Amino acid sequence: MLLDILTPTGKVYSGEVDAVQLPGLDGLFQILNNHAPLIAALSEGVVKVQTKNEKQTFNIKTGIVEVFKNKISVLTEGVA
Amino acid sequence: MGANLKEVRGRITSVKSTMQITKAMKMVSASKLRRATDRIVQIRPYANQLNSVLANIVSNLQGDYNLELAQVRDVKKVLIVLVTSDKGLCGGFNANVLKLAKNLIKDKYADLENNNGIELLYIGKKGIEGFRTYKVDNNTSYVNTLGKLEFENSSLIAQDIITLFKKGTYDRVEVVYNMFKNAAVQIPTAEQFLPVQTNIQDENVSPSDYIFEPGKEEILETLVPNILKTQFFRFLLDSVASEHGARMTAMDKATDNANELLKELNIVYNRVRQAAITTELSEIVSGAAALSAE
């Protein structure tokens, strides 16, 4: 599935991923392949991205995530 | 004639050095303009995605949703955010927005003006200068934010405005700025910032069963301020790009004018020099003639 991390100052990440862990308002949650359509608010925290070969983390500020048809868009005010 | 020759030479030097400055400013503005337009392009995917998420939520909301930031109240107090530049030498850039802001106050909020119902928030020094003779009280200003414009600073200002609107200090917020069309064209624009106008077209939205986490209202609470901050940042980015565009055009014209002036001055200089030589020659010839006549 495809992940985009977008901020007002540009795209931070774009690519094929296996799993994404996100900091929801009520706690961490993970998105895997074929997840149902979802819109969630995100709190400040760490986004963990798992691709085939490597793991990557991003410290995000508050934001929104939209999941639709294996396309994940993380919209955040900024990545530290 | 000799003194005149020196005078013309002095003017040529001065025009040349002015031209050097205008030329340099034009180059600087050109590169800053490129950077500014790049940032406008960069923010676009983020802004578009935010709007599409908003459209998705709104199309999934049944019935009314009561958004605090979309509340239309009786307008008793208006905040006008005036975006200008900190520096001059950019043609009609500042004059145009100032004129638009003054017209807006005169036409739309004439009765509020007499009841102290208008407050101004200046972003950029030129706005303060332009409204110095105007009687508007209790103003806030942000100077030097535009030079190193970052999303963080811009969103702090936006957050302040949002908070004040929520508190009821202002019933409406308008932003007056230069919209960026291209390097040569800026459009002075007045846009309503708050309350949020809810004219979302949900034509190309596929209504699907989204899971909302935690709930639609809570998401809207985070989403709408985000959208507003982004919008505000765009206003400022547009203004910055417009400023550099305007300065570039103005400085380009100034350089052209200097070139023209230089051409004329050179002709004058040559003419004066030739006249001096001719006088000198005729003096020598007549002197020689006087000598040989003896």
Image (cartoon, rainbow, N blue to C red):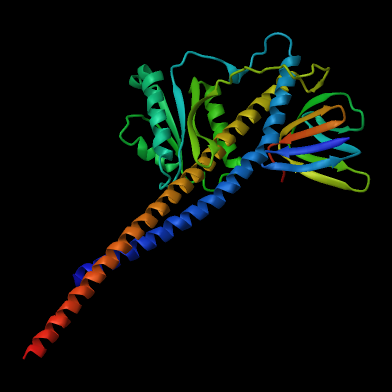
Q: x%, y% of residue B70?
A: 59, 18
**Residue B219 falls left or right of residue B128:** right
Quadrant in which the N terminus of chain B appears:
bottom left
- Residue at the (65%, 25%) spot, across then down: B224
**Picture mark count:** 0
Quadrant in which the C terminus of chain B appears:
bottom left
Residue B7, quarter of the rendered image:
bottom left
- Residue at the (90%, 27%) spot, across then down: A35
Query: Outermost residue, top direction?
Result: B63
**Residue B270 falls left or right of residue B88:** left
Where is B132 relative to B30, above or below? above
- Residue at the (49%, 36%) spot, across then down: B186
Q: Which of B273 and B89 is in front in this view?
A: B273
Confirm whether residue B109 shows in the render: no
Q: Which of B148 and B277 is in front in this view?
A: B277
Q: x%, y% of residue A50?
A: 89, 42
Q: x%, y% of residue B196?
A: 58, 21
Confirm whether residue B69 shows in the render: yes
**Residue B33 falls left or right of residue B218:** left
**Residue B231 falls left or right of residue A28:** left
Q: Which of B184 and A29 is in front in this view?
A: B184
- Residue at the (90%, 48%) spot, across then down: A54
Where is B215 relative to B124, above or below? above
Query: Outermost residue, left direction?
Result: B294
Query: Outermost residue, front direction?
Result: B293
Residue B8, quarter of the rendered image:
bottom left
Q: x%, y% of residue B44?
A: 67, 35
